[in-house]
Image (spheres, rainbow, N blue to C red):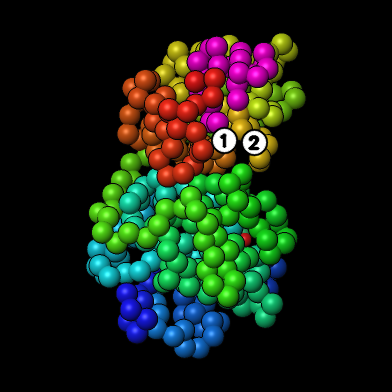
Amino acid sequence: MTSKETAKICLITTGGTISSIYDEETQALHPGLSVDTLLDRLPKGMGNIEVIKRELFQLDSANAQPHHWQTLAGAIKQVSEEIPDLQGIVISHGTDTMAYSAAAVSFMIQDFGRPIVFTGSQIPASVPWSDGPRNLLDAIRVAAFGDIGETCIVFNGEIHRATRTKKVRVNSYDAFDSVDPSPIGILARDIVLYEGRKKRDHSLIPRFDTRIDDRVFLLKVFPGLPSQTLARIVDMGFHGIVIEGYGSGNIPTIENALTRGIQQAIDQKCFVVVSSQCAFGQADLSIYAVGRAAMDVGAMSAHDMTSEAALVKLAWVLGHTKEPARVREMMSTSFVGEMSFTSQNLPSDK
Ligand code: ASP
């Protein structure tokens, strides 16, 4: 693209705080701002950027469900087919479940070759000191000009890989952190991008595949968690469980032991993955006896995937296969940078 050409980007709005208004009656925030009102809050005349608008949902992202991820991926597919010279996509979204939706879009749309940028805000765009206009403008800038070919979250001047992001702050403008690898870029006078990211490549042929199995469960271990919980989850018809263990993926093995429940779940064709409750570091089930016990009965390790990415990935993998060896292989392969380990260089708890 030359500097004189117009960069076309598509803004898909889905709700969230950025689109919220204060309801005097209920005294609570709920989404309601139109895409035009959002764009009206941006400085006039964004140079040579043309924004194509799509209003998809008006949802608080706490209400987002896996089928919304599929609809969103479908909307991206549709607009990218309608407008082949699109430079990138921006999705405005609530922060509460942005990490899940962005991870889902990462798995469902691969080789897009252009940035798919999620953003939102901590304060509604209708409030004068909102972070919404700045985040939206940054996201539009990255979608139009960033040399990025992957799904990311742009927030508070940082560009995070979608599958490595966690919402870590409720009140600060700095809502998100990249977990372990640092952000893939920052926004300053220039868009500063780091090595390791996927670069823009318009020659790629995007692969859209929204198949998922939404019968996956995320269970946080806590002292006192009844050992029968896993059996109840299997009885409810779940096909996969991510257990958020302590530290390096440890679980109770004496009182309220989870080992038997894991084994029984696996025997009943429910796949079990163990992640860590810690934001930084990784599940390594080989370190402690209380981790090895989970591994010995057949649990897989999430390695350094966030629990959010592990849950979404398990849903995506189970949407494609339920063949145990294949599930294990796919869970230990990094598809969209969701973990630093690949099946070739897994640590010892393979
Ligand atoms: N509850 C809001 C949402 O996720 C929070 C936000 O957007 O910051 O939709």
The image shows residue 284 at horizontal and vertical percentages of 60, 25
> Is disc 2 surrounded by few (<14), some (14 to 19) or many (20+) residues within 10 Å?
some
Q: Which amino acid does label 1 sit on?
A: Asp
- Quarter of the picture for ligand 1? bottom right
Left or right of 105, for residue 93 = right
- Residue hosting label 1: 304
The image shows residue 58 at horizontal and vertical percentages of 49, 65
* Label at residue 37: none
Element at badge 1? loop
At horizontal 67% and vertical 80% (from top left) the residue drawn is 128
Left or right of 115, for residue 30 = right
Element at badge 2? loop
The answer to whether marks 2 and 1 mark residues whose Cβ atoms lie closer than 8 Å is: yes
Magenta run includes residue 106:
no
Q: Give the range drawn in magenta.
A: 284-304
Q: In which quarter of the image is the N terminus?
A: bottom left
At horizontal 38% and vertical 66% (from top left) the residue drawn is 88
Q: What residue type is labelled 2?
A: Gly
Q: Of 75 and 330, which appears nearest the observer? A: 330
* Label at residue 281: 2
At horizontal 39% and vertical 83% (from top left) the residue drawn is 48
